[in-house]
Amino acid sequence: MSYLRKYSPLHPHQREPLDEKQVENSAGGYVYPVTIWTNLDRFLILGTEGGSYYAKEWDLTKENVDSVKQCIAEDGIQVVERIREISVSGRAPKNDPALYALALAFTHGNTETKQKVREVFCDVARIGTHLFNFVAFMDGMRGWGRSVRRLIGDWYRTKDDDVLTYQVLKYQSRNSWRHADVLAKCHYGENRGIYRWMKGLDTDKRIVQRDTIDGTQISTTYDATDAMPELLAGYEELKCTEKRADVIKLIEKHEFTHEMVPNDWKNEIQVWAALLANMPVMATVRNLGKMTQIGLLKPFAPEVQTVLERLSDDAIKRSLIHPIQILIALITYRSGKGDKGSLTWEPVPQIIDALDAAFYMAFDNVEPSEKNMLLALDVSGSMKRGGVAGCNGLTPRNASAAMALVTARTEPNYHVFGFSDEFVDLPITANDTLASAVKKVSGLPMRRTDCALPMLYAIENKLEVDVFIIYTDSETWYGDIHPKTALDMYRQEMGRPAKCAVVGMIANKFSIADPIDAGMMDFVGFDTATPAVLSDFAKDAEM
C-alpha cells in the first residue's frame, strides 16, 4: 500500500528492535515482553496444551512455569488469590493450569503462600477429577511429606458423607489415580465407612492383613462402621439390578449421573431419559451426541425441549460453563460424529441453534461502548497451528473469529478486517453464526505475519477508528515498520487518539502492545471477561 511505501524507510523493520524494551519473539521479529502477571493470566486461562506454530508444547510450558515461579517469588499470596479467582469464576475453559500453578505455589512458595494454598485448595479442586490431577502434579514435583498429606487429606475431611460419596462415585479414577491410591498416600485408616468402601473393604468388623516393606504381615482389626450413605447403598444395588424398570427407579430416586450407571444400560433410551431429567448443563452438553445417537433426542421429542431449557440464559449463567466448551460442543454436534471413536448421529437443528445462542450467553454481560471498533484478525500461518486451551481442532485463527463475533453482536459500529502479510477480505458480520464465521477463516492460506497492517489499512482508507482490537499470537516479523509505529502514525495522520487492544490467543510471553503507552492494553483470548473489559477499555476517557 502506498502509505507503507512512503514511510517505511524512516523506521526499523520488524526484524530489528524498535527500542531497548523489545525482545525477539519465536518467529524472529521484535515485540514487547508481557509482564509476568499478564503471562500468568494467559497461562491460567489458555494453558499451553497443543503448543503453537513456532513453539512446541514443552517449550511453552517451560516458559510459563518459569514465569509462574517468578510471580510466586515476587508475591505468592497474590498468585494464589489470582488462581482462585480465575478458577472459581469460570473464566478459564479448563482447570488444569490453575491446579498446576497451585501445585507450584505449594512447592515453591514460602510459609505464608503454603497456608494460602490450604485455604483455597477445596475451592480450586472442587471435584474428584481436579483432585486426581492436582495429586498427579504434586507427585511429579515433590515427595509426600506431612504437609502434602495434610493438604490432600483436607479434601476428604472437609466433606460430609453425602457430598464425598457423590464425588467418589462420579469420579472414581482419573489420570492413573484412584481414591484408594490417594488415601494410601495420605496414610488414612478405615474408620469412616466411605473410606473403607473406597479401599475395597466392607463395613463389617474384620481383620485385614497387609505386607510391610520387609515382607512381614501386620494384622489389624477394624470395628464395624456406621451404615453406608444412602447414595452408596443405592449404587451397590444399582450394580446388581437386572431389570430396566428397577434401574430407572434407582436413577430417579438417587439422581445418579451417567458415570454411575453400568455400561450394560448405556444404550437404553429410557435410561438416558431418566438421566437427562436431573443432568447438569455441562453433562448435557457433553452427551448430546450420545443421546441423539440412541434416539432420545430427535425432532418433536419432548426431551429436545428439555435440552433447550437447559441451554437457556439463566441456566448457562448459573452453570459457569465456558464458551470454549460450548463452541467445541457445537462444532462436534453439528458435524454428526465424535472426535474419537465411531459414534455418529443426525443432529437436531434446534439444538444447533440453541448451542450457537448459548455461546454468547456464557460471556459476561457486555454493555456496548458505541465506539468505532476495527476488529483485526491475524489469519497468518502461525494462527492456523496449535490449539486454544488444549481443545482439538480449535486453532487460534478459528477462536479469534468466534471472539470477534461476540463484539460484532454487541457493538453497533464495527468492521472486521483480516490480515497476514497483506489485507485479507473477511466479511464477518453480526448476522453470521459461529459456524459460518469459523468457516470464513478456516480455508485461508498459510502466510506471513505483519501486525502493523490494521493501522496502515485504516490510514490508507481514512477510517475513523476509536479502538483497534487485534486478535493475534504476536509472532509478527514480516512488516517494514512496527505495529507501535503504525499506531503512532495513525494517531498523527488522522488526529485521533486511537487505542489498541491486543488480544493474545496463545499463552506466550509476547505482545505488540507497548507497556508504557496508556492507549495500548493486553487482553487474554477466551477469558469470559474479555468482551466486557474491552468495552470498558474503549469507553475510558481519552488519553
Image: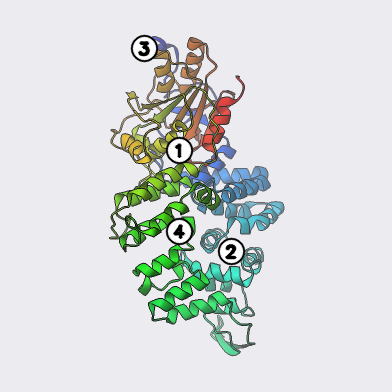
Residue for point 36% across, 32% down: 379
Q: Is residue 76 left or right of residue 301?
A: right
Instruction: Tell me if mark 1 has few (under 14), some (14-19) or many (20+) residues whose alpha carbon lies within 10 angstroms of its own.
Output: many
Q: Which residue is mark 2?
A: 143
442 relative to 97, above or below: above
Mark 4 = which residue?
283
The secondary element bearing badge 2 is classed as loop
Foreground residue, 79 or 363? 363
**Image marks 1 and 4: residues in contact by CB distance under 8 Å:** no
Q: Which residue is mark 1?
A: 505
The answer to which of marks 3 and 1 sits earlier in the sequence is 3
Q: Earlier in the sequence, mark 1 or mark 4?
A: 4
Mark 3 vs mark 2: which is more N-terminal?
Answer: 3
Which residue is label 3 attached to?
Answer: 5
Q: Quadrant of the N terminus?
A: top left
Q: Nearer the viewer, mark 4 or mark 3?
A: 4
Asked whether the viewer can see residue 224, the reply is: yes
Going by the image, does 262 lie left or right of 191? Answer: left
Q: In the rendered image of this protein, does residue 532 appear above or below residue 457?
A: below
Q: Which mark lies nearer to you, 4 or 2?
A: 4
The quadrant holding residue 418 is top left
Q: Amino acid at mark 2?
A: Gly
